[in-house]
Image: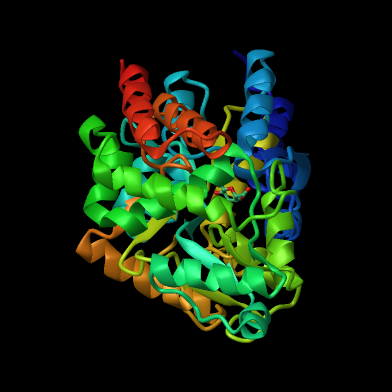
């Protein structure tokens, strides 16, 4: 081959182009389900940061709490051979996508950014497949919270509950004062969210782990679990008739406006209070669900990246992965989202009292065994077992099934799902 200086120059220019950001500014199309006020405020921070680096964000938002609709949309796009660049996917589903061989290996970003040193091992394990990083964690949410309106409690002469007896006493008072005790959204995932907190509150960490992490059939059919269903049924009495189908953020809005006293919900609900300019300890109170002061049911949001061919798209994708775990993003995102940083060593100063308590409880429960993965939010069991649990919980809640029948059905459904 003859030496051609012109060709050399072109190759050189292209290589330089590959290394410089503006020439390679790319687009990321991102599937997520963060459409409520607080969620949108949080995810916009990522769009902004990517834009600063010259990349563009194509929003692929699919509304619907806990992401069931988003996952359906993702599957249909993937089946048609046209997945988005990145998608909000969590827990065991990350492995399922990785097994299909369609995910971008993020090890280069992980190494350059020292993710292994910055992300707790329990979280890193969920993000890896065969030891390689295939997902980026965003945050840590706590599920076992109850969001309360102090004015409602005051008007009703009710006291913040620490036990289930006190909880129902407060419900009675709020009801008698003409307000709705519990703001509730009757959707299977919201029912499961409340239910798993009750499992933890009634049974404690060991019981929760046996029942909802190990899916042990004896525990699922136990008399303790009967108690759980009894409490769950009793709570329904204190919800309003418009609860069926209500979105979670609309239930949060009822507490914000003082129409309802309390809501069982993970701390993305705090994002709604923050977006409405409300201050914890003054405008609202976050209590742990009765009996769960020593427990932290956690849920980690994360993004997987699909393999892309174009160099500019690759660059944008890797930038997104890097930015997600950057200290600045970890602060600004989590302040808006209601969650706490998943990256170690982030200063507490920018966070409110609820987040600071969450951070302390996260560290403390990691030592005592009280740190437990959320079943409802896809951290604990396989999608099939989770589906079986959801079916029984929602059927129970929306019928007059007895608690005794419910526990039998639960154990049987889980057994079948495991086969
Ligand atoms: C959870 C998710 C949160 C929040 C919530 C409501 O599953 O982890 O980030 O979005 O659903 O949609």
Left or right: where 11 falls relative to 350? right
Q: Position of residue 58 (x, y in %)?
A: 78, 40
Q: Residue 120 in the image: state x and y as whole percent.
A: 33, 56
Locate residue 283, reporting x and y percent: 67, 82
Give the colouring mode of the picture.
Answer: rainbow
Seen from the viewer's position, the closer of residues 353 and 174 is 174
In percent of the image, x 58 and y 54: which residue is there? 237
Q: Decide if residue 8 is in sight here.
A: yes
User: Looking at the image, which residue is at 69% across and 26% down?
Assistant: 73
Residue at the image position 66 percent from the left and 34 percent from the top: 70
Farthest residue to the front: give it. Answer: 176
Query: Which one is in front, 86 or 356?
Result: 356
| Place of residue 60 in the rendered image (x, y in percent of width and height, measured from the top left) | 75, 37
Residue 85 visible, this orientation: no
In what quadrant of the picture does the C terminus appear?
top left
The answer to whether 127 is drawn above or below residue 293 in the figure is above
The quadrant in which residue 62 appears is top right
How many circles with numbers are drawn on the protein?
A: 0
At x 47%, y 32%, the residue is 401
Position of residue 328 relative to residue 198, above or below, is below
Location of the N terminus by quadrant is top right
Question: From the viewer's perspective, is 411 left or right of 68?
Answer: left
Quarter holding residue 71: top right
From the viewer's perspective, tell me whether residue 230 is left or right of residue 10.
Answer: left
């Amino acid at each position: 081959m003859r030496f051609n200086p012109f060709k050399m120059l072109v190759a050189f220019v292209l290589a330089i182009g590959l290394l410089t950001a503006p020439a390679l500014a790319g687009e990321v199309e991102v599937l997520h389900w963060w459409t409520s006020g607080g969620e949108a405020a949080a995810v916009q921070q990522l769009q902004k940061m990517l834009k600063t680096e010259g990349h563009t964000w194509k929003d692929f938002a699919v509304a619907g709490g806990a992401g069931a609709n988003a996952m359906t949309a993702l599957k249909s796009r993937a089946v048609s051979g046209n997945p988005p660049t990145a998608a909000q996917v969590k827990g065991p589903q990350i492995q399922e996508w990785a097994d299909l061989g369609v995910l971008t290996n993020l090890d280069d970003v992980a190494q350059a950014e020292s993710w292994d040193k910055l992300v707790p091992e329990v979280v890193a394990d969920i993000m890896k497949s065969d030891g390689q990083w295939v997902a980026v964690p965003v945050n840590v949410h706590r599920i076992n919270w109850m969001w309360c309106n102090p004015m409602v409690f005051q008007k009703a002469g009710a006291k913040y509950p620490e036990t289930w007896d006190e909880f129902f006493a407060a419900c009675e008072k709020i009801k008698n004062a003409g307000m709705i005790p519990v703001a509730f959204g009757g959707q299977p995932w919201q029912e499961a969210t409340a239910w798993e907190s009750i499992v933890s509150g009634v049974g404690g960490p060991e019981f929760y782990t046996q029942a909802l992490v190990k899916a042990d059939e004896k525990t699922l059919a136990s008399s303790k679990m009967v108690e759980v269903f009894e409490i769950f049924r009793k709570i329904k009495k204190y919800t309003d008739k418009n609860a069926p189908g209500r979105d979670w953020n609309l239930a949060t809005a009822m507490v914000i406006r003082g129409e309802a006293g309390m809501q069982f919900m993970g701390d993305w609900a705090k994002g709604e209070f923050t977006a409405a300019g409300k201050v914890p300890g003054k405008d609202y109170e976050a209590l742990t669900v009765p009996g769960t002061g020593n427990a932290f049911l956690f849920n980690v949001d994360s993004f997987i990246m699909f393999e892309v061919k174009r160099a500019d798209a690759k660059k944008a994708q890797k930038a997104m992965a890097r930015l997600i775990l950057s200290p600045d993003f970890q602060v600004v995102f989590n302040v808006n989202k209601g969650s706490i940083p998943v990256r170690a060593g982030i200063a507490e100063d920018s966070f409110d009292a609820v987040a600071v308590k969450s951070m302390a409880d996260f560290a403390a429960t990691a030592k005592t065994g009280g740190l437990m993965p959320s079943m409802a939010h896809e951290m604990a069991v396989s999608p099939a077992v989770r589906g079986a649990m959801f079916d029984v919980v929602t059927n129970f809640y929306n019928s007059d099934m007895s608690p005794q029948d419910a526990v039998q059905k639960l154990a049987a459904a889980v057994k079948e799902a495991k086969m």
